[in-house]
Image (cartoon, rainbow, N blue to C red):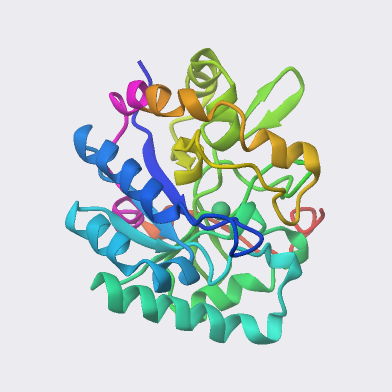
């Protein structure tokens, strides 16, 4: 039905304050158990602060055969970070994940796809810190983030890492990241089928989901750095998430993004210079 789609999970703790119950460990274990049952290997991108608090979750993911990647040191959009501190913080979080997992950490995913023209200062830092690939951009116009004009297939940043752009498709005039997050939770499977059918063979398709999306019992709180409507949407459709994912995983691929990056012929990838116009425009 759907062609090979890699599976990724972003492990994060979105609570704005400690008095809300921390359910990140419980829900991550729930999703890892689902992956194990469905015999799926995935890339698990983990926020550094969550890894520090729940190292046993990382160890379970490694034991189950997953690749571990870094989802930044804290779950703060890149636009709100201080470039001066970022390199050290990213490097420290990568080292921590390597110590806990025993794996070389090769992949980076920015929080909320926040690698945009405004935050392109991150690109050389990813290279210096030692990542070989990133999956941090939405190659389209988007109300939150997005970098319109980027290729929709994997490419290489000039002098730097491989980028796996978030898969997008056009539905009724809107270009949407149809394979993951709220789009996965709220849209029927026909949207995914249409998007996959339209995708080119050059694209690397991946879904992204979050442990909290599998949690219908979490009490509501307002998410930070987003509006009220976006925050509310994060609580819709959670009850049906596990069932939908179970169906989806039947056709998913067990090839992780790290597997794909390691077998790519780098000399054949398009090179994108983030300074080059018109790709540098917002
Ligand atoms: Zn995230």
Side of 169 where 53 appears, left or right: left
Side of 103 where 18 appears, left or right: right
Residue at image position (73%, 39%) is 230
Side of 35 where 84 appears, left or right: right
Check the picture and name the quadrant holding the N terminus. Answer: top left
- On the image, the x and y values in percent for residue 150 come to 66, 48
Q: Residue furthest front?
A: 19
Residue at image position (49%, 71%) is 49
Closer to us: 51 or 239: 239
Q: Quadrant of residue 253?
A: top left
Kindly tell me whether residue 210 is visible in this rendering.
no
Q: Vertically, is 72 above or below 25?
A: below
Closer to us: 80 or 203: 80
- Residue 260 in the magenta stretch? The answer is yes
Q: Give the magenta part as a residue range.
A: 246-264
- On the image, the x and y values in percent for residue 161 come to 49, 66
């Amino acid at each position: 039905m759907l062609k090979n789609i890699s599976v990724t999970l972003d492990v994060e703790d979105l609570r704005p304050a400690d008095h809300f119950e921390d359910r990140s460990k419980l829900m991550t274990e729930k999703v890892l158990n689902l992956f194990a049952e469905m015999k799926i290997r995935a890339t698990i991108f983990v926020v550094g602060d969550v890894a520090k608090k729940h190292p046993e979750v990382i160890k379970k993911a490694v034991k189950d055969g997953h690749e571990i990647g870094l989802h930044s040191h804290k779950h703060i959009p890149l636009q709100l970070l201080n470039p001066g501190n970022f390199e050290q913080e990213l490097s420290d979080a990568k080292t921590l994940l390597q110590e806990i997992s025993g794996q070389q950490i090769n992949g980076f995913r920015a929080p909320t796809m926040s690698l945009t023209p405004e935050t392109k200062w991150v690109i050389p830092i990813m290279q210096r810190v030692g990542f070989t690939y990133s999956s941090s951009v939405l190659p389209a116009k988007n109300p939150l983030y997005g970098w319109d004009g980027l290729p929709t297939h994997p490419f290489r940043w000039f002098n730097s890492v491989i980028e796996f752009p978030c898969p997008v498709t056009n539905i009724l005039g809107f270009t949407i990241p149809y394979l993951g997050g709220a789009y996965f939770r709220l849209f029927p499977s026909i949207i995914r089928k249409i998007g996959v059918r339209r995708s080119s063979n050059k694209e690397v398709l991946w879904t992204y989901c979050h442990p909290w999306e599998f949690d219908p019992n979490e009490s509501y709180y307002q998410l930070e750095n987003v509006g009220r409507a976006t925050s509310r949407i994060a609580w819709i459709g959670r009850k049906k998430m596990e069932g939908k994912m179970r169906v989806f995983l039947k056709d998913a691929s067990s090839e992780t993004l790290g597997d794909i990056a390691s077998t790519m012929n780098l000399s054949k990838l398009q090179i994108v210079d983030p300074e080059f116009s018109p790709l540098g425009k917002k």
